[in-house]
Image (spheres, rainbow, N blue to C red):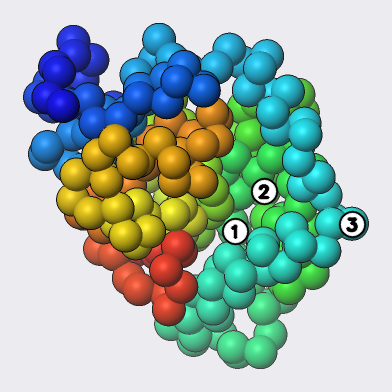
Amino acid sequence: MTTSTSTSCPLCNSNALSLISQDERHRRSFYLCPDCDLISVPPQYHLSRTDELARYALHDNSLSNKGYVDFLSEVADVAVNIASEMQHTAGLPINDPMERPVKLLDFGCGRDAVLCGLLVRRGIECYPYDPLYEGLRRLPDIVDGYDIIVAGEVVEHLRGVEGELRFMSGLLREGGAIILRTRLYDDAGLGADGGGEGFKNWWYAQDPTHINFFSRKTLDRVALIVNKRIEETGRRDIFVFR
Ligand SMILES: [Zn+2]
């Protein structure tokens, strides 16, 4: 299928998108960008904010959900490692994180901001931010920028993803790091065309709140936007941009 669309790629602005798959159940279509490999769902198919919030409310993303806490601990470990490296580089004792708290922003933290709860216990000064929730919409006044920004399972939900990445990058101090967590479609064996018609059956694409899907090549474009290099973490769904 190569039906063209007037929609442009939300990551690189290419106009040459092609329709690769249609999900009748969720009444939406997936378009592949030939330049950056992003697969996206055009705005006319996005959920309303009310429906989007209703979907999130179905998840038990709280501190009492062990599965969720274990899941977050994986990204917390990566953040703590980077924080330790930053302290080490600054010549501070690596085992004394309270000596110079690393300032971290949890971008798109969710209603209960659980990751911040975990990180504060580990000596990191964590600030929650989520424009979808009352009380989490205001960014704290940080004069010299954040050391680390975490966006865990966030980029696949973002409308205007390029602008949001640039915004993130502007909040970071010089030499800071961005940690992104998202599933890559090529990692799921879906190939360079996103698996074509079969894409809609991938569990990640079945979530109607997911509107952006990345491949490894797409991450190169992200690195360009945030002006950083990608570092491997040993986890297939967690990437550091530094
Ligand atoms: Zn693109």
Residue 155, x across and y down, in percent: 45, 41
- Nearer-N-terminus badge (1/3): 3
Task: Pick the residue in front: 230 or 138.
Answer: 230
Which quadrant holds residue 81?
bottom right
Q: Is residue 173 visible?
A: no
Residue shown at the point (55%, 52%) measured from the top left:
152
Q: CA distance from mark 1 to mark 2?
A: 8 Å
Along the polypeptide, which appears first: circle 1 or circle 2?
Answer: 1
Q: Does dot 1 land on a helix, a strand or a loop? A: strand
Residue receiving disc 3:
64
How far across and down, in percent of the image, does residue 131 sit?
A: 62, 27
- Residue 82 in view of the camera: yes
Residue 153 is labelled as: none
Q: Residue at x 51, y 37 (%)?
A: 206
Amino acid type, label 3: Ser
Residue 127: give its label: 2
SS state under label 2: strand
Name the mark nearer the viewer: 3 or 2: 3
Image position, residue 240 (x, y; %): 39, 64
The amino acid at mark 2 is Tyr
Q: Estimate the x, y position of residue 235 in percent, counting from the top left.
A: 46, 73
- Cα separation between marks 1 and 3: 25 Å
Secondary structure category for the residue under label 3 = loop
Gap in Å between the C-alphas at discs 3 and 2? 20 Å
Residue at which label 1 appears: 103
Disc 1 to disc 2: CB gap under 8 Å:
yes
Q: Depth check: give the residue in front, 130 or 217.
A: 217
Q: Is residue 157 above or below residue 188?
A: above
